[in-house]
Each structure stands twice: as structure tokens, then as C-alpha cells.
Image (cartoon, rainbow, N blue to C red):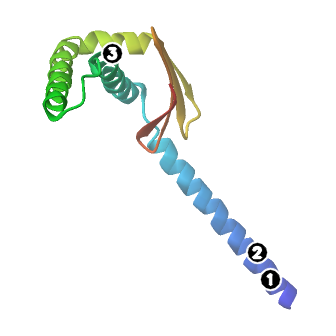
Amino acid sequence: MKASLRSRQGISKSLFTLIAIAGVASVMSFTNPNNNAYVDYAANRLTSEIQNAVCKGPQLPQGQLWEGVSKLTATTCKSGLATGLAFQSSNIKDVITQSTERQNFFIFSIYTTKVPGYNFRTIGAFGNFLTFQK
């Protein structure tokens, strides 16, 4: 009698585990981000990378005056570059669209984008993106 009770408990736990796994897989498949969402994410990420690369500027001497000038210069560069890149947003998105390969595993996707100077590998799951190789 004890053996049959243990057997039922084992089956119940296994069934619960299978239902939980199926539930998580269903949620993941519904929240697997599409290509358009990735292109928006990648365009923002690439724009940020370009701004950081271009606007880091030369190191100025130490001192309170120079720190203020350095911060002002970096801020001006980033805002000016952001304005210019905003006008090119559709071109940037076109380049990313043409340079991206998507591997769709239904519950998540892996995006590989190769643009001049940058190679990104990004995983998309639960409606979010995580770039794990750049």
C-alpha cells in the first residue's frame, strides 16, 4: 500500500513538472521577440556604441576646470551625434536588417549582426534582448 502511494506521488510530481515546463515554454514562445523589435534594439545599441567610440575624446589635464570642459565636450558631442544619427535612423535600421541573421528556436531567438567594425550576437527571450558577444 505504501509503495502505491509513493508511486502516485511520484506521478503527480512528474505531471506537475511537465505542466510547469510546458507553461514556461508557452510563455517563452509567445514572448519571443520578432525581427522588428530586434532591429529597433540593435539600432539603439549601435548608435550608443558609435557615440561612445567617437565622443570619448582626448584625455585632458587633471583639475576641476578641465573636468568640466571634458564633461561638456563629451555631452555636446553625444547630443550632436545623436541628432545626426536620428536623421539616419531608417538607414541604420536598413543596414541592420540586411546584416542580421536570425536563428529562431521558437522559445528564443539568436540574432547575429555583422556591420563594418562591429559583430553582435544577441539572444532574444521573454520580450527582451541580451547581447552576449560584441
Q: Nearer the viewer, residue 25 or 84?
A: 84
Identity of the amino acid at label 1? Arg
Q: Residues within 10 Å of mark 2 (few under 14, many from 20)?
A: few
Q: Secondary structure at mark 2?
A: helix
The reply to whether callout 2 and callout 1 are in contact (CB within 8 Å) is yes
- Look at mark 1 in the image and give the residue it sits on: 6
Residue 4 is situated, as x and y percent measured from the top left of the image, at: 84, 84
Residue 9 is situated, as x and y percent measured from the top left of the image, at: 73, 79
Q: Quadrant of residue 87?
A: top left
First-in-chain label (2 vs 3): 2
Which residue shows up at 41% across the image and 40% down it? 128
In this rendering, would 57 be left or right of 77?
right
Q: Residues within 10 Å of mark 3 (few under 14, many from 20)?
A: many
Q: Secondary structure at mark 1?
A: helix
The answer to whether residue 63 is above or below residue 31 is above
The reply to whether callout 2 and callout 3 are in contact (CB within 8 Å) is no
Identity of the amino acid at label 3? Lys
Q: Quadrant of residue 82?
A: top left
| Residue 10, numbered label | 2
Which residue shows up at 61% across the image and 56% down it? 21
Q: Nearer the viewer, mark 2 or mark 3?
A: 3
Q: How many marks?
A: 3
Calculate the distance from the C-alpha at mark 2 to the C-alpha at mark 1.
6 Å
Q: Nearer the viewer, mark 3 or mark 1?
A: 3
Identity of the amino acid at label 2? Gly
Q: Secondary structure at mark 3?
A: helix
Q: Nearer the viewer, residue 118 or 23?
A: 118
- Look at mark 3 in the image and give the residue it sits on: 93
The reply to whether callout 3 and callout 1 are in contact (CB within 8 Å) is no
